[in-house]
Image (tube, rainbow, N blue to C red):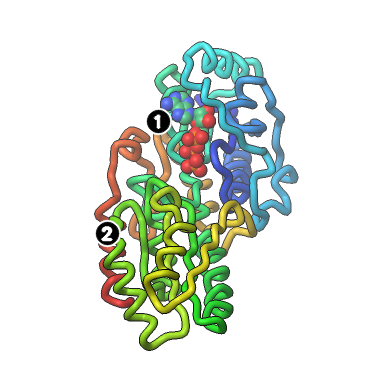
Amino acid sequence: MIKSIAVLTSGGDAPGMNAAIRAVTRTALSKGLKVYGVHDGYLGLFKGQIEELNRRSVSEKLGSGGTFLGTARLTEFTDIEIRKVALRNLRIYGIDALVAIGGDGTYRGALALSQMGLPVVTIPVTIDNDIAGTEFTIGFDTALNTIVEAADKLRDTSSSHRRCSLIEVMGRNCGDIAVATSIACGAEVCIAKETGYDLEAILDNIREAAQHKRHAIIIVAENIVDIEELAKTITKKTPFEARATVLGHVQRGGKPTVRDRVLASKMGVKAIEALLAGDNHHCMASKANDIISMPIEEALNGDDTAVTLKEYEVFKVLW
Ligand code: ATP
């Protein structure tokens, strides 16, 4: 029987992590469980950086960005000896189960712990929306809003100067950020892993835009092309002068949107309910406006590329 749980945040931070910790903590306390927070993800689990949490520990956290527990990357967590130390630390505190909040790497670490006998549930928090099985990850919506706000500002200035703005966004393995923001800011071109990269088609789109607009926007997912080089080519081969902007880590920060706060809260509640119902290697997922609990393996082995491409079709119809 589970009497005591630990919660941690791991991998890349994203807005909504604090809201998820709060929901996990308060739900678990309301069910009579003891709750511990682990600092700095699996690194803190290995080092034994664990403290008890109460209702007040998570006050004033719902709307704040980042993670008050801290996060870290520990590549050595793939080593079973390191994980044995982590499990020993949990035993010292009498902790029976773990809620791990993070992206797919965090899921892999959680699955490895569950295979060693620890009941684990995970909550998908990453701005990339790159976890299969869940329609949305926590943090995605906030990042989209940050990007669209920046793109709107860049449009103002590029329109004044008759320019093309290239905006590099995060999401190297999943084009959801690029596609959704391209739709939301009416971009001329969207370049992501799933959409392919056709330079001549891009130049044609930009030349076409130049005939009737004072600006053009290209959204590019990171690690696909060198946007400085692409900007030079566009300047040379189209009527627009092109400028490249890399948004970088600003996309990970900020207060979570209402949508992310609500999603984090619902998933936090469901995570504890699932754990107490006997789910012990499961992840939370949003599906058809509901939160479901599914095996972590299913999420790690799934592929949502078709969903991304369907959204890209919407972009292509509207640009
Ligand atoms: P993001 O998607 O935002 O980068 P993430 O959770 O995918 O977040 P990672 O750095 O990939 O971030 O993973 C977080 C941590 O999970 C790693 O630093 C490592 O400690 C652990 N981890 C990742 N893969 C494994 C694995 N195969 N076995 C055990 N632990 C793992």
Q: Quick one: label 1, few (<14), some, or many (20+) residues within 10 Å?
A: many
Nearest the eye: 159 or 294: 159
Q: Residue at x 53, y 66 (%)?
A: 145
Relative vertical location of residue 3 with respect to residue 318 in this rendering, above or below: above
Q: Quadrant of residue 202?
A: bottom left
Q: Is residue 121 left or right of residue 212?
A: right
Residue 130 at x, y = what percent?
A: 39, 47
- Residue 256 in sight from this viewpoint: yes
- In the rendered structure, which amino acid carries the disc numbered 1? His
Q: Residue at x 50, y 81 (%)?
A: 162
Label whose residue precedes the other's in the sequence (2 or 1):
1
- Closer to the camera in the image, 157 or 83: 157
Q: Position of residue 135 (x, y in %)?
A: 37, 54
Question: Does 60 sit left or right of 287 as displayed?
Answer: right
- What is the CA distance from the residue labelled 2 to the residue labelled 1? 30 Å
**Residue at figure coordinates x 61%, y 56% from the top left:** 250
Residue 185 quadrant: bottom left
Where residue 124 appears, x then y in whole percent?
A: 46, 45
Nearer-the-camera pick, 141 or 269: 141
Point out residue 293 in the picture as x, y percentages from the top left corner.
38, 42
Q: Which residue is mark 1?
A: 281
Tell whether circle 2 marks a residue whose Cβ is less than 8 angstroms from ligand 1: no
Q: Which residue is mark 2?
A: 309
